Amino acid sequence: MRRFASKYAALAGALAVMLCGASSAAAEEAPVTLPIQRLTLDMAAKAAMAVIEDCRKRGLNITVAIVDRGGRDQVVFRDTLAMPLTVEVARQKAYAAMNFNTPTSQLEKRFTSPFSPGKVQGIVLSAGGIPIEAGGTIIGGMGVSGAPSGVTDEECAQAGLAAIETDLEMSM
């Protein structure tokens, strides 16, 4: 009986050493922190001003909001005559586009059930929000509100993205 117990103890000890070695090797390979790409304030402001300028050429006063990867406001520009409500709508479009990583115009009809994400407070799923990507990585979202239609909001947002697209691609 002692012989069996000592063999069992030796086997258990060897297995424990082997498992500890494997877990420490895996721990050495796994990063402790992750680098997260973010837009600089200057790039966010450049994109937002391009949106404002594009909408002004169309005779429109809008609000543009840009959120970072965490969904926090990075810049919010409300043009002189844009209605106050457009601030929150633009933020929520930007937040939705960033979280779903797709233009909000593509989400309008996707969520129609009574308990869908479209009914979640803080998310607006109407056209005018686009994700901001660089090198295949989502780095934020942009939302526009105040034009007569979401389609026009989204066209203005695309102008903002176009203004920084080369800078984004060169940075990756």
Image (cartoon, helix red, strand yellow):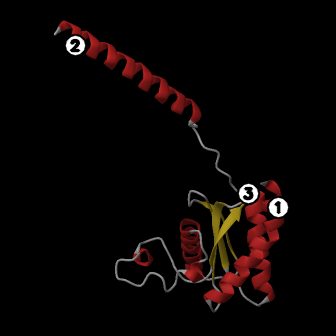
Quote the CA–CA distance across marks 2 and 3: 69 Å
Q: Secondary structure at mark 2?
A: helix
Q: 49 and 71: which one is in front?
A: 71
Asked if disc 2 and disc 3 are in contact, CB closer than 8 Å, the reply is no
Residue furthest top in the image = 2
Q: Position of residue 59 (x, y in %)?
A: 76, 90
Q: Amino acid at mark 1?
A: Asp
Residue 45 circle label: none
Q: Badge 2 is on which residue?
A: 4
At a point 55% along the width and 80% down the height, the residue shown is 85
Q: Badge 1 is on which residue?
A: 167
Q: Amino acid at mark 2?
A: Phe
Circle nearer the N terminus (1, 3): 3
**Disc number lying in front (1 or 3):** 1
Quote the CA–CA distance across marks 1 and 2: 69 Å
Q: Amino acid at mark 3?
A: Leu
Q: Badge 3 is on which residue?
A: 41
At a point 72% along the width and 88% down the height, the residue shown is 60
